[in-house]
């Protein structure tokens, strides 16, 4: 049976688009923004730190960041109850 491997997204800021070919060997490229010069790629969760270090050593790479999406809480239904958002006098109360 097919086994799911946990993956993590990396956001890689680049100086030029030539480095995109070199990035393909490190993981699956999901999105390329040629105008804003960044790449979103997925790598195995177990190899994230090794690959992040290798990619940051490439010549045309400015910065490598981990995606914050897995760390976010997807169950935020009511922001007022969690304390993230508080009602003010100007807000309409339900």
Image (cartoon, rainbow, N blue to C red):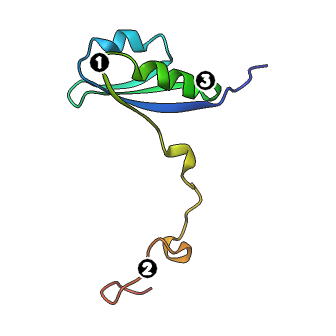
Residue 14: percent from left, percent from top: 29, 24
Eyeballing the image, is 22 above or below 92?
A: above
Which badge, 2 or 3, comes first in the chain's sequence? 3
Task: Say which mark, if any, is on residue 46.
Answer: none
Please state which of residues 91 and 66 is positioned toward the viewer in this rendering: 66
Which badge, 1 or 3, comes first in the chain's sequence? 3
Q: Distance of mark 1 from mark 3, alpha carbons?
A: 21 Å
Residue 68: percent from left, percent from top: 49, 45
**Mark 2 in CB contact with mark 1 (< 8 angstroms):** no
Residue 64: percent from left, percent from top: 40, 31
Instruction: Look at mark 2 in the image and give the residue it sits on.
Output: 86
Task: Say which mark, if any, is on residue 47.
Answer: 3
Eyeballing the image, is 82 above or below 88?
A: above
Residue 89: percent from left, percent from top: 33, 90
Please state which of residues 30 and 52 is positioned toward the viewer in this rendering: 52
- Eye-nearest disc, 2 or 1: 1
Q: Residue at x 31, y 15 (%)?
A: 59
Instruction: Look at mark 1 in the image and give the residue it sits on.
Output: 60
Q: Residue at x 32, y 13 (%)?
A: 19
Q: Quadrant of the C terminus?
A: bottom left
Q: Quadrant of residue 93?
A: bottom left
Which badge, 2 or 1, comes first in the chain's sequence? 1
Local packing at callout 2 (Cα closer than 10 Å; few below 14, some 14-19, many 20+) is few
Q: Secondary structure at mark 1?
A: loop
Q: Quadrant of residue 75?
A: bottom right
Q: Distance of mark 2 from mark 3, alpha carbons?
A: 40 Å
Local packing at callout 1 (Cα closer than 10 Å; few below 14, some 14-19, many 20+) is some
Q: Secondary structure at mark 2?
A: loop
């Amino acid at each position: 049976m097919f086994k799911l491997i946990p993956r993590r997204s990396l956001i890689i800021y680049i100086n030029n688009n030539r480095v995109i070919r070199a990035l393909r060997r490190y993981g699956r490229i999901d999105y390329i923004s040629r105008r804003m010069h960044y790449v979103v790629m997925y790598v195995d969760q177990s190899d994230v730190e090794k690959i992040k270090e290798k990619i940051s050593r490439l010549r045309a790479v400015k910065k490598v960041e981990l995606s914050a999406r897995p760390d976010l809480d997807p169950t935020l239904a009511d922001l007022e109850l969690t304390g993230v958002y508080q009602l003010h006098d100007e807000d309409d109360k339900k």
